[in-house]
Structure formats: C-alpha cells, structure tokens
Amino acid sequence: MSSSRISTAAQQKRGQRPEDERLPMAQNIGFGLQHVLTMYGGIIAPPLIIGTAAGLGEAEIGVLIASCLFVGGLATVLQTVGIPFFGSQLPLVQGVSFAGVATMISILEGGGSIATVFGAVIASSIIGLLITPVFSRIIRFFPPVVAGTVITTIGLTLMPVAAGWTMGGNAKSEDYGSVQNLALAGATLVLVVLFSKVGVAAVSRLSILLAMVVGTIIAAATGMADFSKVLDGPVFAVPQPFAFGMPEFQVAAILSMVIVILVTLTETSADIIAVGEIVGTKTDARRVGDGLRADMISSAISPIFNSFTQSAFAQNVGLVAITGVKSRFVVTAGGGILVILGLLPVLGRFVAAIPTPVLGGAGIVLFGTVAASGIRTLSTVKYEGNMNLVIVAAALGFGMFPIVAPNIYDQFPSWFVTIFHSGISSSAIMAIVLNLLFNHLKIKGNRPQSVMAEASNRRISSAMLGELQEGDYVQDGKLYDSKSNHIPCAD
C-alpha cells in the first residue's frame, strides 16, 4: 500500500476528509503554481479565440485574458473553500469552459457582438443555477461502471490537447510538429518520470512543476523560448467591470447558450465524481449540487468582469491523481495565483512564454493518469452475468467519435453538435442512459443477458468432471477424495 493511501486511511479513521489536509505555506504555493501551469494554456485559449472572432484588437484581447484569469481564480477559491450552498470543497480548478467557444463564435457570426455573448452567458447561467437541483440528483446514476467510463474518457479526450502542445501549439507555425518541438516535449516527459522516481516526497510530488522549469531552461538555452515581450504592456491592472459595454440580451443567443450550460453541468458533474474517486472521499448529491451552484454563480457573475462560462478543468484532475496531493487548499492557493496573474499582466505574460512543447511533455503524463484512474475504477466493476461490458464499450466508443473524427457531426443541427461534440458529455450521456436501461429498468422475469456479457474466468474441462467420484472435495485449492487422500491434478 502506498504512503498516500495509508495517509488517506489514517485521516478517514480520525474523521478527517483527505481533501482537508493542510500543508505548509511553501508547499501550498508550489503545488498551487503547478496547477496553474497545468491549466494556463487552457484558460487563455478561449478568450484569445473569442476575442479574435469578435474583431477585437490586441490590447482588448489582453483585457479579456486578464479578466478570465482573475475570474477563474475567484471561482476556484469559491469552489475549494466553499460557502453554504456554493462550492464542492474539492481540489477542482475553475476556468473558462471550452464547451461554449463554438456557440459564442456562432453568436458573433450571426450578427451579435461581444456584449451579446456576455448577455447570453449571464441569462443562461442563471437558468443553469435554477436547474442544478435536478442535476445534483444524478449522483445515484454514477456507479463505478459509469464513473470509471467517464473518467477514462476525460483522460483520452485530453490527449489531442497534449499532442497539439507537443507539436508546438500553433498549427499555422512553420515549426509545428518539428523534431525540435518533439524533442523538447520528450525531454520534459523524461524529466517528469525521473523526478517522480526520486525518493524525496517533496521532489516527486513537484515532478510536473520541476520538469516544466527545467524544460523551460533547456528551451531558453536552445533559443526555443522567447521572453522578450514579457515587459511589454502594463505591470498592474484591475479588471474594469463592463469594459466592453453593458450586456445585450437576445433570445436566440440565450437559448443556444442554455445548451452549452447543460453540457457544462454534465462535464462538471463528471469532474466532481472523478476527483472524488481519486481523492477517496464522499461525493453525494448535496456536494455535487454545491459544486454545480458554484459553477453557475461564477458563470453568471463572470461577464460583469469581462469573462465567460466557468467550469472545472479536467486536466487538473489528472494532476491530483499523479501527485497524490489531495488537499483542496493547494488548489485554493492556485486560485490565489490566478487572481494575482489577473491583476499583474506581466506575470501572466511570463507564464505564457513557457513553450507549449514543455506543456505537452507534462500533459502526456497528466492526461494519461486521468485515463489510468478511470481504468482502475473500472477494474472494480463486476462484469459477469450483466451488461456492464456493453455499457463500457458503447460509452467509450461513442465518447471517442468526436475525438477521432472531429467533423462527424457537421451535418447535424447546431444544438446536437453543441452537446455531442464534447467526448466527455457524449460518453457521460451514453453511460448514464445504458446504465439506466440495463441496471435500473427491471423487467419481471428477465435477466439482462447478452452474448457480450463476460463469462466466468474459471474453466473446468468436461473430462475432469468425469473423473470426479462421490465424496471428492476441494480444500485450500487442492482436491481430496472421501478418505482425505490428496489427488494430484495433472497439467
């Protein structure tokens, strides 16, 4: 048994939840920074994409990015610390959700402005806040067969992100996919493994951060990192409320964003279940509801400070799994760092200068760990005499469709694409529906069997059965006759 599991068992015996562990301040900051580095690329990408689609200038896009960092930090603090009815009190990092990017671009292309997007986010998030009691009840429909499938899918769907980072991040760049980028990512990956192997707990737990630091140093020494623009722009700036004008509320835009909110609620529910499984703590309907309410209230308020819908970041779930650091206060520290980055754009520009291949090398381990955690959960599922194997197979396959074939739903209505373009939500919906159908919907006198239902792993030949005589018995794995004489079994 690992030291982290022993620690968790001891905490539970004392009545202390694993996520309530308090570490020294220096470790909180170090591990918190590691969380920020893990999700930084993800949190700045949506405002960059949306700002460009809205025709904003570089300075205005910079305001969007700083605002998203600031709001993401506040949302993370709310989610981890929690107040009555808001916050799951789990190590979950919050940030701008990718789920709404396509819909927001559609609003802009349909004649709307950035103010229209903000209005749609506010209205749809309030609707989401009102329906969270319904979503919090789905916890009973997330047994290991569903939770394990969704966790595995989360890890697998994040792999294209790691691949993109590894190749250089920008597909239009001349060095995208170059040997140099892949070599830098590979060196970072090797460093993660080596630091993880070190016997000193402080080093092994910070393996991701240390690998990123060393990888960045290597990149700087080889001319692959550029910090020349770090000092360009203001050092300190407070996000200005409604910097792009008052929000505009259009019914069509709001309805399209409601679908995004439903997807966000589904994904956040899956992330809460996933991190609960990894931490080894109880995640009941009330806790899921508190987490979803924190998501929705953060999303409703974020447009005031020029940001967008908020959700839990799946990649940071992998960081919790690989480091074994389960304390929610570590993530609270990460939220504080995000707030500071939002107030100090110069620090944000410094972090943004870290080469994406460095992030890619670390991401391989991070996202792979999420998938491995899901597989570990699936290993506890009983597959004999039921349809669980079909549930896992169908949900995983359905979740992988939009990943291996991103254009598969191009001919479908936009509402369908919004929901099922996410591999996570696709897998979650399929797993929940099939679990309800096969494990909850009972038909009298009918046992759910299938040719795909896994049979017992044990096999006894008919010839062996024919050799048994009356009075033979088995004890401690050995066969004896009626007089207690051992009967040797031939290979």
Image (cartoon, rainbow, N blue to C red):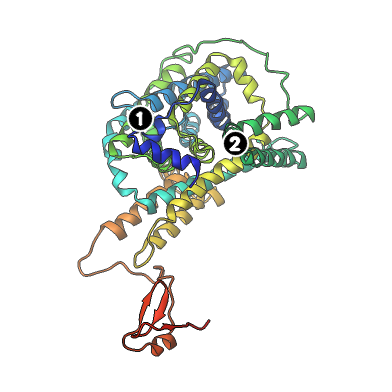
Amino acid carrying mark 2 in the image: Ser
Q: Earlier in the sequence, mark 1 or mark 2?
A: 1
Give the residue number, with chain letter if any, for mark 2.
204
Q: Is residue 264 left or right of residue 365?
A: left
Residue 115 is situated, as x and y percent measured from the top left of the image, at 44, 21
User: Is residue 93 shown above or below 431?
Assistant: above
> Quick check: 198 above or below 476?
above
Which quarter of the picture shows residue 385? bottom left
Residue 425 position within the rendered picture, expressed as x and y whole percent measured from the top left: 42, 45
Q: Residue at x 32, y 32 (%)?
A: 128
- Say which residue appears at 51% left-offset and 83% top-offset: 490
Residue beneath the point at 70% across and 42% down: 186
Residue 126 vs residue 468, the one in the foreground? 468
Res 267 seen here: no
Front-most of residues 259 and 489: 489
Q: Which residue is mark 1?
A: 124
Q: Which mark is residue 394?
A: none
Residue 202: x and y, percent? 58, 31
**Image side of residue 327 versus residue 12, left or right:** right
- Seen from the viewer's position, the closer of residues 318 and 264 is 318
The residues tagged by marks 1 and 2 sit, at their Cα atoms, a distance apart of 43 Å
The amino acid on which the numbered mark 1 sits, given as a three-letter code, is: Ser
